Amino acid sequence: MKLKLMVTVLGLVGLLVFGGCGVRKLLPVIKTPVVTTPFTPSGKVTVDTDKFTGNITYHLEMYLSGTNNDGADLEASVSKFPGSGQSFNLDFYSRSPSGKYSSCHRTNWLVDGKEFEMPSPSYDSTTSNGAGFFFVNEHIDHLFIMPNYRVGKLVNASSIEFRICLDEFKLTDEQINALRDLASHLDSK
């Protein structure tokens, strides 16, 4: 009995040391409904300047609480490209064990209770794995090339709601004010 136990322990140690990828087969994959965020949203506008190109990007990161107890991050940015224009970008980030938006990532927006047309979204995803957890990091992007009158309508709204597939999100008053602050960095031309 002791010999069998010792061989089993030595076999596991050998597997851990020499065959690390085999450990995944021994450990259960733990699925969790908890949505974690890829960054800690601050709600404050930050600025980055590329010293090589002079491009300036203003960032705003916000955590959103949605229906179905899902959460996600919304990152908005204003990018200025000296001599060639500017853009306003809304990026939605979600991290889940299932990749729930991979086959359904259409969006619908309501601004002040009325349907609001957004630029067509782009979608991409990556996977991450660690400590027995498997996550799909999803990214849905709406890019406004400036000038675009819709940005003014969006950031001057009193209510902003959107739906991705079947999940609904609503921005708080503080989040709308932060978007307005971010948009103030756009040139008015």
Image (cartoon, rainbow, N blue to C red):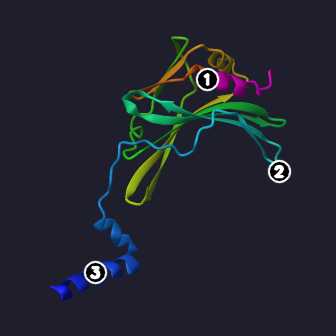
**Extreme-bottom residue of the structure:** 3
In this picture, residue 83 sits left or right of residue 183: right
- Badge number at residue 9: 3
Q: Quadrant of residue 157?
A: top right
- Badge number at residue 174: 1
Q: Which residues are magenta?
A: 176-189
Q: Residues within 10 Å of mark 1 (few under 14, many from 20)?
A: few
Q: Label 1 sits on what residue type?
A: Glu
Q: Percent from the top left, x then y, of residue 21?
A: 38, 71
Residue plotted at (30% across, 78% down): 12
Describe the element under mark 1 as helix, strand or loop: helix
Describe the element under mark 2 as helix, strand or loop: loop
Q: Nearer the viewer, mark 1 or mark 2?
A: 1
Describe the element under mark 3 as helix, strand or loop: helix
N-terminal label among 3 and 1? 3
Give the residue at mark 2. Answer: 52
